[in-house]
Amino acid sequence: MAEASVPHIADSHEVIRVIGARENNLKNVDVEIPKRRLTVFTGVSGSGKSSLVFGTIANESQRLINETYPTFVQQFMAQLSRPEVDGLENVSPAIIVDQERMGANARSTVGTATDAHAMLRLLFSRIGRPHVGSPQAFSFNVPSVSGAGAVTIAVGKDKGKKERRSFEITGGMCPRCEGLGEVSDVDLDELYDKTKSLADGAITIPGYSPDGWMVKGFTESGLVDPNKPIQDYTEQERADFLYKEPTKIKIQGINMTYEGLVPKITKSMLQKDRDSLQPHIRAFVDRAVKFLPCPECGGTRLNEGARSSKINGISIADAAAMQITDLAAWLETVDTPDVAPLMVSLRQLIGSFIDIGLGYLSLDRASGTLSGGEAQRTKMIRHLGSALTDISYVFDEPTAGLHPHDIQRMNALLLLLRDKGNTVLVVEHKPEVIEIADHVVDLGPGAGKAGGEIQYEGDVLGLRASGTITGRHLDDRARLKESTRTPKGALEIRAATQHNLKSVDVDIPLGILTVVTGVAGSGKSSLIHGNVPAFDDVVVVDQSPIKGNRRSSPATYTGILDTVRSAFAKANGVKPALFSANSEGACPACRGLGVIITNLGFTQTVETLCELCEGTGFSDVVLEYTLDGRNIAEVLAMSASEAAEFLGKGPAHTILVRMIDVGLGYLTLGQALNTLSGGERQRLKLAISMAKKGAIYVLDEPTTGLHLADVDNMLGMLDRLVDAGNSVIVIEHHQAVMAHADWIIDLGPGAGHDGGEIVFQGTPADLVASGTGLTAKHLREYIAR
């Protein structure tokens, strides 16, 4: 390990001390991290940064906090296992601010996720005119209901009695769309084949097999004739089949609730967030349903009463729909003394959105539509105004999705959290963030088995002189190309108006490397994802989660496992199914999972390593078979680089080489897919897609998660794709990728309604020479260093 340029921190209470960390690929790591400082963790992808920061420090902090809750509370929490570490000292409570999407709740918006909407509701309940009720009268998640029910009231010291009292709840939910803001228009022809009867399988909805309980609810209800073609139903039968309200019936002696087909699938499929659905369900919903703004509330989610109350002519729906920069300006006009303290807090919260580069959003934006970087910055807003101090804030590449102009603002916010007396831990590759660190911990020297060791601890000046991979590449700068490729045609996009695009006309060149740039929210994704996939031969490679279960791995996702199983079967004269942990080869104790899952109560489970198979998931019989001296578990434990050498040739070898090309040589074949970062997921998808020739590849920030030393490899891979006859369109903020482009399309000049225009089109050299926007400014500074 290189010598640090700062002295050992003597006061043991001023450091978080990690002793003997062995989580994942960490090799008995000892490290001291200064408290109330900004520490950046660096190293190549797969070097062990996340294993140290998230898997060890943050995991143990949250585990210890969870253990302080009563047992009945713990059963509702995720059960965290103790990390592989000998000791952790002086760990602060940790708050993880990561890039995970903000859930699949269709009722969650930017406003509800940050408490901004709750503060607006309080404001309108206080000074909105006409006065329509308490804050819940402005909540689209609270219905208006009235009725009577039994309540317990206190009588004396220890006694209580029940009384029946009338009640009325005045909520703001639109009754038509139930607070979702949209209604569904169902194509009935996609629900059933009207020429068939229910008994013959007329219903074509996934999961509605003729002999299943879902269909038996209709066939045995007595309301419709199960043997009559649906097209021959009487008007009453059709109404009962499609739209009947919930009704109690009895089927085979079992009490059940009958409900028409349309309301049934509306609740089970249509009212759920689209991205949370399984792929085949999502495909059905896309075919069968069109979602339209609710005609009663206009998409605001709110009932007429909530919309009628206004402040200075603005309703809460109007305020939530404003671009946040406009909302901030409007709030300055609200100067009623009765709400002065509330206005201070609300203005500060809304100002945080702008400070963090999210001023182009609106509070009514569904939180599930945010990118990973936007989601992380939105979560960060919750903590900027917090009164808590001496907390450990843990960030995973907070600059993901940020233009160089926005990185400066992110840095200011990280320093603000530190200056409030908190410990800020950041996993990051961008030199702009590394340079503001008080302390740097560099891991490596390589990835996977070749990593997991501390290479350097100290300040940034010492890192530059350390000789580590990070230190050597910290000041890397790409040069502008001496010559650029000549386009071979173009994709013509005309009058594009998605989201904030202002009737954009643009020709995207084919046969070259085109980079689309602009500040966050300028319209890059709207332009490319909203228009390019409509053309032929387009391959979109993004960072969205890869669908699968806990058994899914790079080996299963890429199809490598099929080849490997066949090779094992041929070498040993047995069936390929024997080498599947999901089939005949599964360990009988854990059924191929590699862990034993123990249910300790309601929602509470504990996972322990299976002692019989020692975590491999395979039975002893399977592990006796070998291929060139290795059993199936040993092959799945190989990294892509090791497996490429082991397999030597064939289809699997080709895919493995592509994985190495995109910087994933360190991934093990059997690693769970749900442990991959967004950048790793994108590069894995790219490795599979690279076989297609003459295609148009669309990549969304492919440098996400890449170390400085790996960016050159990514640029080489992009060149190889183009040289093979493909067109490559990259949405990217990294200046090295901009400099390497053949053509740049820059959107802006700002974000939201301040963007949506083409600011520049041309070569990188022309952008540096004559460009006037923010991208030109930062690329010019980058090249000049």
Image: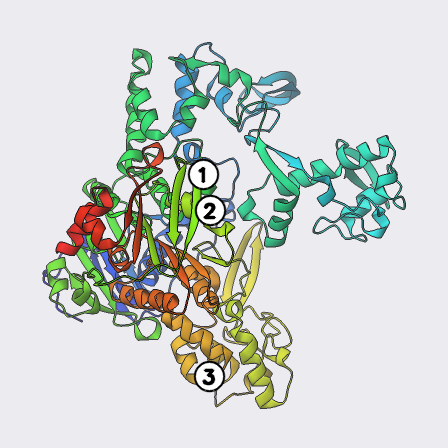
- Mark carried by residue 647: 3
The answer to which of 178 and 597 lies nearer the viewer is 178
The answer to which of 578 and 28 lies nearer the viewer is 578
In percent of width and height, residue 121 lies at 43, 22
Q: At label 2, which amino acid type do we have? A: Asn
Q: The residue tagged with tag 2: helix, strand or loop?
A: loop
In percent of width and height, residue 478 lies at 21, 61
Judge depth for marks 2 and 3 and give the one in front. 2
The answer to which of 124 and 85 lies nearer the viewer is 124
Q: At label 1, which amino acid type do we have? A: Gln
Q: The residue tagged with tag 3: helix, strand or loop?
A: helix
Residue 774 in the image: above or below residue 176: below
Residue 81 in sight: no
Residue lying at 50% horizontally and 66% vertically, measured from the top left: 608
How many numbered badges does the structure rendering display? 3
Q: How dense is the environment of label 2, judged by Cα within 10 Å: few (below 14), some, or many (20 and up)?
A: some
Query: In the image, 345: left or right of 511?
Result: left
Residue lying at 62% horizontally and 80% vertically, measured from the top left: 576
The answer to which of 637 and 759 lies nearer the viewer is 759
Residue lying at 37% horizontally and 65% vertically, measured from the top left: 722
